[in-house]
Image: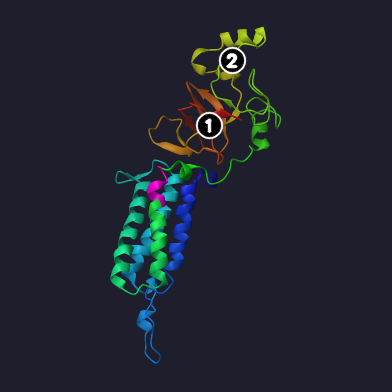
C-alpha cells in the first residue's frame, strides 16, 4: 500500500483507532473501592467482558481497518457494499453501543470515558472524510519523482519534457507546472512551433510513436482503471503525489503508480505536468 495515498481523514481514523485500543485496557468502572473490601469485579477492563470488547472496542478497530484497506483496494465490494461503507457502519455501531453502555454504567471509568471520546472521533472522521475538503487533503506531501524512473524510459535524470524542474511546455514560464492538454501555438511562439501545433492531432492526443513519458499530478482523487477495460478501478490516484504517464490511450493516459501498477486514467481534466 502506498502511504502517500492516505488522506488526513485516514490519519484521524488511524489515530482514533489506536486510542480506542489503548482504552480497552483501562478500567471500565470508576468505583472507589473501600478499604478491606474485595472489589476485583469493579476493576475489570474490556478484555474481561467479551460482549463489550467485541461490540465496542474491536468493532471500532475493525471498522478503521476496513476504511484503510478500502483506500488500498478501491472498488472492492462484499455482498454489494464497498469496504469503506462496511468500515463506516462498524464505527457508527461502536459509537452507538458505547453511548448507551456509558449511560447504563452510572460510574464510568477511564476505559469507557476515553473509549467514548475515541469512538466519537472515529465515527466522525469515517463519515466526514469523504465530504470535508480539509480531510480529503493528502496526509503526506508529494515527493519529487525518482530520477531512476525517468532514466528507465530512455531519458537522462532531471531532463525531458514533463519532469518536475525539467524542460517546460512551449511558452511556459520556468518552474511553473503546466496543465495537461494546454494548447500550444499561442501568440508569441516561433512560427515553426505554431505550425507544429496546427499539425498535431485533434482531441489532445499525441501519436503513439512521439509520446514522451512525463510526470503529472491530479487535482482531486481519481480512479485508475485496468488496461483490460474492466469497470472496477484497480487503484486511486491521490492529489499531492506524482505519477508517471507512459502512454497515450485516446483521450486518456496510461499511468503507472509508485508501486508499479499500470492502468488507464480516463479523466485527465485539470491534471498538472511536473
x%, y% of residue 91? Answer: 36, 55
Q: Does 76 appear above or below 244? A: below
Q: Which mark is residue 255?
A: 1
Provide the secondary structure element on which disc 2 rests: loop
Q: Is residue 127 magenta?
A: yes
Q: Nearer the viewer, mark 2 or mark 1?
A: 2
Instruction: Judge left or right: residue 271 versus residue 127.
Output: right
Q: Residue at x 43, y 63 (%)?
A: 20
Label 2 CA crowd tier, 10 Å (few <14, some 14–19, many 20+)? some
Q: Residue at x 64, y 35 (%)?
A: 149
- First in sequence: mark 2 or mark 1? 2
x%, y% of residue 260? Answer: 55, 39
Q: Does 245 appear above or below 97? A: above
Give the distance between the C-alpha atoms of the residues marked 2 and 1, in whole angstroms.
23 Å
Q: Is residue 84 magenta?
A: no
Label 1 CA crowd tier, 10 Å (few <14, some 14–19, many 20+)? many
Pointer 2 residue: 184
Q: Residue at x 56, y 12 (%)?
A: 200
Look at the image and give the residue range highlighted in magenta: 125-131
Instruction: Specify how the rendered protein is coloured.
Output: rainbow
Instruction: Judge left or right: residue 201 versus residue 115.
Output: right
Q: Does 19 appear above or below 76? A: below
Provide the secondary structure element on which disc 1 rests: strand
Q: Residue at x 41, y 59 (%)?
A: 61
Amino acid at each position: 500500500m502506498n502511504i502517500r495515498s492516505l488522506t488526513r481523514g485516514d490519519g484521524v481514523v488511524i489515530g482514533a483507532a489506536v486510542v480506542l485500543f489503548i482504552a480497552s485496557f483501562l478500567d471500565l468502572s470508576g468505583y472507589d473501592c473501600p478499604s478491606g473490601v474485595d472489589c476485583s469485579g469493579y476493576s475489570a477492563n474490556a478484555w474481561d467482558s467479551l460482549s463489550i470488547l467485541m461490540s465496542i472496542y474491536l468493532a471500532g478497530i475493525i471498522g478503521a481497518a476496513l476504511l484503510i484497506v478500502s483506500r488500498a483496494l478501491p472498488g472492492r465490494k462484499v455482498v454489494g457494499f464497498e469496504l469503506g461503507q462496511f468500515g463506516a457502519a462498524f464505527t457508527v455501531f461502536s459509537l452507538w453501543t458505547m453511548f448507551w453502555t456509558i449511560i447504563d454504567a452510572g460510574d464510568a471509568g477511564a476505559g469507557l470515558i476515553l473509549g467514548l471520546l475515541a469512538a466519537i472521533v472515529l465515527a466522525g472522521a469515517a463519515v466526514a472524510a469523504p465530504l470535508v475538503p480539509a480531510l480529503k487533503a493528502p496526509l503526506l506531501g508529494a515527493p519529487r519523482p525518482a530520477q531512476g524512473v525517468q532514466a528507465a524510459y530512455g531519458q537522462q535524470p532531471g531532463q525531458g519534457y514533463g519532469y518536475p524542474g525539467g524542460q517546460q511546455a512551449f511558452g511556459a514560464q520556468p518552474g511553473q507546472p503546466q496543465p495537461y492538454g494546454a494548447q500550444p501555438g499561442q501568440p508569441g511562439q516561433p512560427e515553426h512551433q505554431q505550425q507544429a501545433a496546427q499539425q498535431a492531432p485533434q482531441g489532445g492526443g499525441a501519436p503513439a510513436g512521439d509520446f514522451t513519458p512525463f510526470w503529472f499530478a491530479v487535482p482531486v482523487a481519481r480512479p485508475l482503471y485496468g488496461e483490460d477495460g474492466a469497470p472496477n478501478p484497480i487503484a486511486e490516484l491521490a492529489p499531492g503525489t506524482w505519477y508517471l504517464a507512459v502512454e497515450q490511450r485516446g483521450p486518456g493516459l496510461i499511468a503507472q503508480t509508485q508501486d508499479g501498477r499500470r492502468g488507464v486514467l480516463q479523466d485527465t481534466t485539470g491534471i498538472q505536468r511536473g
